[in-house]
Image (tube, rainbow, N blue to C red):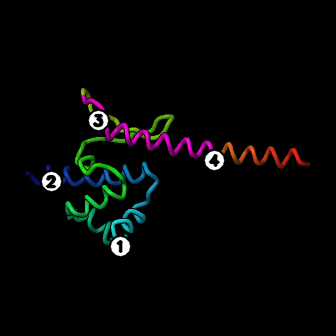
Amino acid sequence: MSDNQHDIFFARIEQNIRQHAKHQKITLSELSSGIDMTEAGFYKMLSTESVKVKTLRKIAEVLKLPIQLFFEECTLTKNVNGYIRKSEPNELPNQAEYLTERDALKKQIELLESQINDKNKIIELMGKK
């Protein structure tokens, strides 16, 4: 593997970790705590391209994702319903994409239901006056 390919490979892993954490609203600080690492150690690991497979497994467990997603060339794009994985041309969506999108939609539904409950409470309180 040439130096350029090596750099691209680790940049892809780092980008995917960051994107999936952001998508799940998990900060890198929370992610580092979840894998029993200091925040400084986590950032150093990413910047020095010294990510071990064991660490990737832990990260995948915290993010509840299959480890192979870290190696794929993908970007998460935002749509009306949240983030979805943008596939490469002619690539069939895989189960992990659907699971990620489903989880994002579930979180959005929970948020909307919570907002409805809050508004109903406000209406109820205003009706008592």
Report the residue marked by disc 3: 94
25 in the magenta segment? no
Report the disc number at residue 38. 1
Identify the residue under disc 4. Answer: 114
Name the outermost residue toward the right: 129
Dividing the picture into quadrants, the one containing residue 61 is bottom left
Residue 55, position as x, y percentages in the image? 25, 63
Instruction: Note whether 92 is above or below 62 in the view shown.
Output: above
> Which corner quadrant of the image does residue 17 belong to?
bottom left
Query: Which is nearer the N-term, disc 3 or disc 1?
Result: 1
| Residue under numbered circle 2 | 6
The amino acid marked with disc number 4 is: Ser
Residue shown at 63%/47% (left/top)?
114
Q: Distance between the residues labelled 1 and 2?
A: 25 Å
Q: Do the residues labelled 3 and 2 touch (CB within 8 Å)?
A: no
Q: What amino acid is labelled 2 in the image?
A: His
Q: What element carries label 1?
A: loop
SS assignment at label 3: loop
Tell me the kind of residue under disc 3: Asn
Q: Dot 4: few (<14), some (14–19), or many (≥20) neighbours within 10 Å?
A: few
Q: Does the magenta stretch include residue 101?
A: yes
Q: Earlier in the sequence, mark 1 or mark 4?
A: 1
In front: label 3 or label 1: 3
Give the spatial CA distance, label 2 vs label 4: 46 Å
Where residue 29 appears, x then y in whole percent? 41, 65
